Amino acid sequence: MSMSQDTVIGVVGAGTMGAGIAQVAAAAGHSVLLFDAVEGAAAAGLERSAKGLSRLVERGKMEAEVRDALLARVRPCGELRELAPAGVVIEAIVEQLEAKRELFKQLEALCGPDAILATNTSSISVTSIGAQLGRPQRLVGMHFFNPAPVMRLVEIVSGLETSPAVAEQAFALAEAWGKVAVRARSTPGFIVNRVARPFYAEALRIFEEGGADIATIDAVMRESGGFRMGPFELMDLIGNDINYAVTCSVFDAYNQDPRFRPSLAQLELLNAGRLGRKSGRGWYDYGAGAEQPEPRTAFPTPIPELVGLCGRVEPAATLAAMARAAGIQVEELPGNGYLEMAGVELHLSDGRSATERAAASGHAKTVVYDLAGDYRKAGRIAIAAAAQGPEHEVLPVCGFFQALGKSVSVIDDIPGMIVLRTVAMLANEAGDAVGQRVASPAGVDQAMRFGVNYPKGPLAWADELGLETVVTVLDHLAAHYGEDRYRVSSWLRRRLAAGRACHD
């Protein structure tokens, strides 16, 4: 069937997501039939869209005539049978398998034989939803992200029976609507909800271990890692109940793989009713006048007069160049890529704690620093010192980074720091998704950049760091914890052994 603007689009479910999808389709010029089983809900959904569009008009971002024409293309329907003329029907109802199955059986009987039936499910198997249909090849996943008019990603999910032609038509339709479409196979969590789990899981583990407090973890992930929001801020925005439920769903679907194990700290939060912004309190307090915690930040410290660059290896070479620009004398010395100041060796973390690293080298005065997305632009850096070294050894390191314009967070000596272990685990999960043919490397990176606004795709980031570095970090984490959680993706190991990058 043709996917021209003449194709009528049906949307079932007029909540925030369904009404948003209807708005997207109408903005692309389609006539849209919007139905909800709750009486009056379709009209209410359209009214919410009208209010949102009117705010755009008030801010000068949309012409009133464009708004009115868009809204005129959406018709609320009182009965499901009114969707019979639709060439594409997108379901956005409750996340319950039986409810979706029953709906699609009705739609299959109502709509034409060439109509595409699409589910917006974020977690249920497309194969399972279509298992009772007479023509399951017509069913495809079109997973939009909330809010649908703003978020650019759409995951096009093929079930076991989905026709490749139907998946390609859905892909082309999403692109015609101005979205970034990525192809995925129907597996638990698809791409984004699966690959994103370590973003939350590693932060929760660091917090549970006392490695750093939530405000510091969030600040380091934002100001050093370059993420738009820290993991605890994002969990509060999503809702801790929803975030925890998705984690449990993926955990159970993957036979309770320890990589996806839910957090007891987050469960305790739910038991207290602290769901996040929507309940007024989550990891943070959103009540009127509530005092927000500040990230741990070192006091101003004297700047070291001389820094040794021991081997011209990144990122030490970049930091040395920044130090020279800040007026610090830098002396080049032999070494394997670290900095030296006042007798302290400053190393980029390799997944070991500073204490483990010091024990291996025999140099007690060892400090490690965290990964940054861009060391020149980063506003904050996390550091940790070896336990057997004197407490004051962090002072010249604090002064060094402060001279480069960074806030410094001294955290507990945990392996892999904050950003580095998170990025390594994101790349690891992305590698597993590619290795299991869920999506291509490019598809995974696009999904994470446009679905959850990551500053870099995890596999592109792995290529930038070097697969050897990523694998080394994961191996060191696995050795420290003695858990299968940090096992290296077979796909990443094979790429490394073959001397190939993720995107090669």
Image (spheres, grey):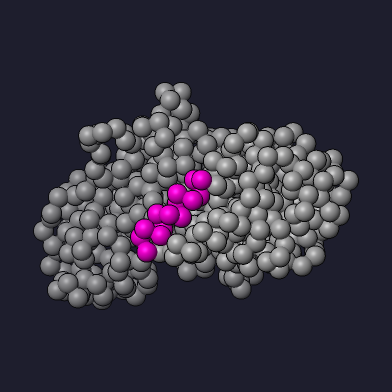
Measured from the top left, where is residue 490 in percent x and y?
Answer: 65, 56
Query: Going by the image, does 109 lie left or right of 12?
Result: right
Residue 356 visible here: no
User: Quick one: 447 or 223, which is closer to the camera?
Assistant: 447
* Quarter of the image where the C terminus is located: bottom right
Residue 132 occupies quadrant:
top right
Measured from the top left, where is residue 181 in percent x and y?
Answer: 62, 63
Q: Residue at x 38, y 44 (%)?
A: 233
Measured from the top left, where is residue 252 in percent x and y?
Answer: 65, 35
Q: Residue at x 61, y 57 (%)?
A: 73
Residue 472 is covered by the magenta coloring: no
* Quarter of the image where the N terminus is located: bottom right
Is the residue 6 above or below the residue 37 in the image?
A: below
Residue 102 visible here: yes
Q: Main secondary structure of the magenta part?
A: helix
Q: Residue at x 78, y 36 (%)?
A: 102
Q: Hey, which residue is sitting farthest top in the picture?
A: 271
Count of numbered circles in the view: 0
Q: Hey, which residue is sitting farthest right in the picture?
A: 134
Q: Which residues are magenta?
A: 47-60
Residue 52 is covered by the magenta coloring: yes
Measured from the top left, where is residue 360 in percent x and y?
Answer: 39, 53
Residue 254 occupies quadrant:
top right
